[in-house]
Amino acid sequence: MAPGGGVVTGGAASTQSTGGGAAPGGAAGSTGAAVGQRSMARFARVAFRDPAAGNVEAIVVLVPDGWQAAGAVQWLPDWSRLAFLQTRIADPATGLAIEWLPIQDFIWFQAPAGFQAPIGGNYQGKAYVPPITDPLQFVAQHWMPGVLAHLQSAQVVSVVQVPAIADEFKRGFGGPAQAFAYRIRYAYVSGGQAWEEDVSFALLYSESPSITSWYVNFAYAVRAPAGQIDRSGGVISTAVASRTSTPEWEASFRLVQQLFRQGLQQQMADTAAFGRMLTQYRAESAALQAQVTQERQASQDRIADLQREVLGGVQTYVDPVNRTLVQLPVGWNEYWVNQRGEYLASDQPGFNPNTLNDGSWLRLATRPG
């Protein structure tokens, strides 16, 4: 569909990770932390393309062997958030699923006489909603009517604050603000079985004497049969840490931000016009891509430390193939990467996957320091 007209599909918008079948040493589709008898864990690089942006790779995520992955880009030209990178990965063997949640920008002020925007309406690209500071209330009002409807009758088990994520939100915002990050665990029964779900997100509030702008970010949910989330911590953290937009797509997104500020929402909502604009500004997009790449290289160490601290159960390795850092589950003896961007961890000391006639593998080394 056209940007803003629904979920953009096509390309690799719905795919299954490579490998499949039975994971070595465990049940079909299981990996590492989720099984008792294990020998290897394998993660494949899965990418989802955005047809509206020239079919470039938009989202990249590491998916455990045997898991399923689906993703798409939904452009939202009427809103300042502009795009939602829909992503969901799941293990069909255990039911464990990781799903990234829709995010939004909000604004609030005392409405003057004649003001037309209703509560929840669009005001200059932000939702006109009074600030919500209670995290449970925010989940109930923002997500439970939709993607988290199954949690409406769930029991709240715990609410944990995550200061490192809040600090990262404030750093990225760049102005005076207050931020809070949470991980809320819910318990519920589905199909006669006990389930748990962790909902993680951060809220930021920026106030002036008459206007409050507030935002939600870093939002995703992890659901599984009771006990499975805690047993699969390293696998979950690896997937969450890996999920990112590509510099090429991020450049297009920043260009669209500029178009939004110029008030070109109508052209952005038309597929053909949208594509022509991105082509017209190709040189500028290339410059933005170089800027994104430089920014990410400069912040690799900081982001790696943040992910390891917040997510837990992962260690940071230097990837000689992609020339970047990668987080993989702790507790294995050998870690390898191949030219396809797949990662493998083995319990067997001295194991060399090059003996499997499965491509050319290079051993990963932990990041210095």
Image (spheres, grey):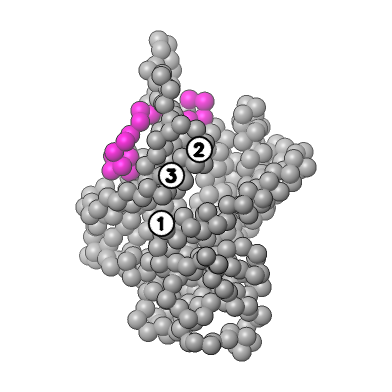
Q: Residue at x 41, y 12 (%)?
A: 112
Q: Nearer the viewer, residue 236 or 161?
A: 161
The answer to which of marks 1 and 3 sits earlier in the sequence is 3
The residue where tag 3 is placed is 167
State the image coordinates of residue 227 (x, y, percent, origin top left): 28, 68
- Indicate the amino acid at tag 3: Asp
Q: What is the distance, in whole Å, between disc 1 and disc 3 at their CAs?
A: 12 Å
The residue where tag 1 is placed is 310
Badge 2: how crowded within 10 Å, few (<14), some, or many (20+)? Answer: some
**Range of residues picked out in magenta:** 123-139
The residue where tag 2 is placed is 173
State the image coordinates of residue 202 (x, y, percent, origin top left): 40, 44
- The answer to whether residue 155 is visible is yes
Q: Quadrant of residue 133?
A: top left
Badge 3: how crowded within 10 Å, few (<14), some, or many (20+)? Answer: some
- The answer to whether residue 89 is visible is no
